[in-house]
Image: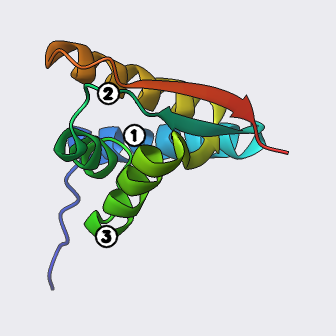
Amino acid sequence: MSVKQIIWSPTAVTHDTEIEKEQDIRQDEALEPLWKVIAHDDPITTMEFVVRIMVQIFKKPVIFAEAIMWQVHNEGLSVVDTLPKTEAERRVKMATMAARLEGFPFSFTLEPAD
């Protein structure tokens, strides 16, 4: 006859709790209204930097990041993404901070998505 041993693991409980918190955050964001993140052209920010920000912060594939960069360059602005307001604000803050650290005036605006 064999006896099964049950081992309690605090990491398993923590992991489940973290998953539940992440699910709650996603549900909250799903209920938030969406906002458009708009990038604006300026004469100083480099094209390379714009592409890097689109990939690293806005999680765009390089091909889309380059398309956004060209639209900003040629038309003066581009809608980068449409996100729940808190996430849009978070990413704009990160991108703006990265731009300032490198001496670029790269800027964004947010507007409600219809």
Q: Say what amino acid the circle numbered 3 marks.
A: Ile
Q: Residues within 10 Å of mark 3 (few under 14, many from 20)?
A: few
Which element is circle 2 on?
loop
The type of residue carrying mark 1 is: Glu
Q: Is residue 70 left or right of residue 26?
A: left
Q: Residue at x 50, y 27 (%)?
A: 108
- Give percent across and percent down for residue 114: 85, 45
Please state which amino acid type lies under the numbered disc 2. Pro
Q: Residue at x 41, y 20 (%)?
A: 93
Of 113 and 74, the residue lying toward us = 74
Point out the image quarter for the N terminus.
bottom left
Q: Residue at label 2?
A: 43
Query: Foreground: 33 or 21?
Result: 33
* Residue drawn at point x = 71 percent, y = 30 percent: 111
From the image, tell me which residue sits under label 3.
Answer: 63
Which numbered disc flags the more N-terminal residue, 2 or 1? 1
Res. 18 mark: 1
Residue 5 sits in quarter: bottom left
Asked which secondary structure carries label 1, the reply is helix
Which residue, as the protein is rendered here, is positioned at the far bottom?
Answer: 1
